[in-house]
């Protein structure tokens, strides 16, 4: 589903060129769970932003489900993010004045909320253990509950791809394990491809794919279809 070919990203700070990614290539099959691992500054979040059309590579190509992300207009990128991608972030990104179910429905407010979408939002929250909390605001929810709201929001549009940036970073280990277990179940039912950026290798399960970055380069890939070091490093 996802093909990244010889992608480099250079940020400009005045006259200085700062490379964030250098000649990155990888493939992620449809429906796979993939973890992008690496220390701070390795380029993990930059790669996630490129996969989500939040930024463009300096060189190289990115194709998702046969669609090239390079050269898209701003409008095309907006439509791609709106329809094809669900985002889950470390800090939840919930609106304080909205209830749980209203936060799940936020992406659809600009185009209008249907009864079916509201029913699906309630269903997702219930599936994730928040059936009795749908009318609570973020300040009335625990960190784990807030992240479940954020995950429900990402799943509501049944996206082809979910991108999660350190989704368990604000949670204790018990809540983190429960959150990822819930996400695995629902994403498997929907056939969603999931890419998670994290420092934590402990969440990787057999059959998952792993892309390890260091200093903006892929140093290792492993998983269901691959189990080898790239560029000769481990």
Image (cartoon, rainbow, N blue to C red):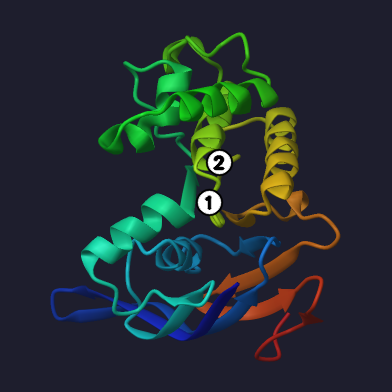
Tally of numbered discs? 2
For the N terminus, the quadrant is bottom right
Q: Judge whether residue 227 can be spotted in this image.
A: yes
| Residue 25 image offset from top left, x and y in percent | 56, 84
- Residue 190 versus residue 201 in the image, above or below: above
What distance separates the C-alpha of mark 2 from that of mark 1? 7 Å
Numbered badge on residue 155: 2
Viewer-nearest residue: 190 or 93: 190
Q: Judge whether residue 146 can be spotted in this image.
A: no
| Residue 151 image offset from top left, x and y in percent | 56, 36
The image quarter containing residue 114 is top left
Left/right of residue 133 with respect to residue 71 in the rendered view: right
Who's the residue at 56% across and 28% down the image? 120
- Residue at label 1? 159
Who's the residue at 62% across and 55% down the image? 194
Q: Are marks 2 and 1 in contact (CB under 8 Å)?
A: yes
Left/right of residue 150 with respect to residue 97 in the rendered view: right
For the C terminus, the quadrant is bottom right
The image quarter containing residue 212 is bottom right
- Residue 140 versus residue 21 in the image, above or below: above
């Amino acid at each position: 589903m996802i093909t990244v070919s010889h992608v480099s990203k250079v940020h400009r700070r005045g006259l200085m060129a700062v490379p964030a990614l250098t000649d990155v290539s990888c493939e992620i099959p449809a429906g796979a769970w993939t973890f992008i691992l690496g220390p701070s500054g390795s380029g993990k979040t930059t790669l996630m932003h490129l996969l989500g059309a939040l930024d463009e590579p300096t060189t190289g190509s990115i194709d998702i489900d046969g669609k090239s992300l390079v050269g898209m207009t701003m409008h095309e990128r907006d439509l791609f993010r709106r329809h094809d991608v669900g985002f889950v972030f470390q800090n939840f990104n919930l609106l304080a004045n909205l209830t749980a179910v209203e936060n799940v429905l936020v992406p659809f407010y600009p185009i209008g909320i249907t009864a079916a979408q509201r029913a699906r939002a309630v269903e997702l929250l219930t599936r994730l253990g928040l059936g009795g909390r749908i009318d609570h605001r973020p300040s009335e929810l625990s960190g784990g509950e807030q992240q479940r709201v954020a995950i429900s929001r990402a799943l509501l549009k049944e996206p082809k791809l979910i991108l999660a940036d350190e989704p368990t970073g604000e949670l204790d280990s018990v809540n983190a394990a429960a959150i990822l277990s819930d996400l695995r179940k629902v994403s498997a039912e929907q056939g969603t491809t999931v890419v998670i950026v994290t420092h934590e290798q402990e969440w990787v399960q057999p059959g998952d794919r792993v892309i390890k970055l260091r200093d903006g380069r892929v140093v290792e890939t492993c998983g269901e279809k691959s189990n080898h070091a790239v560029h000769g490093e481990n």
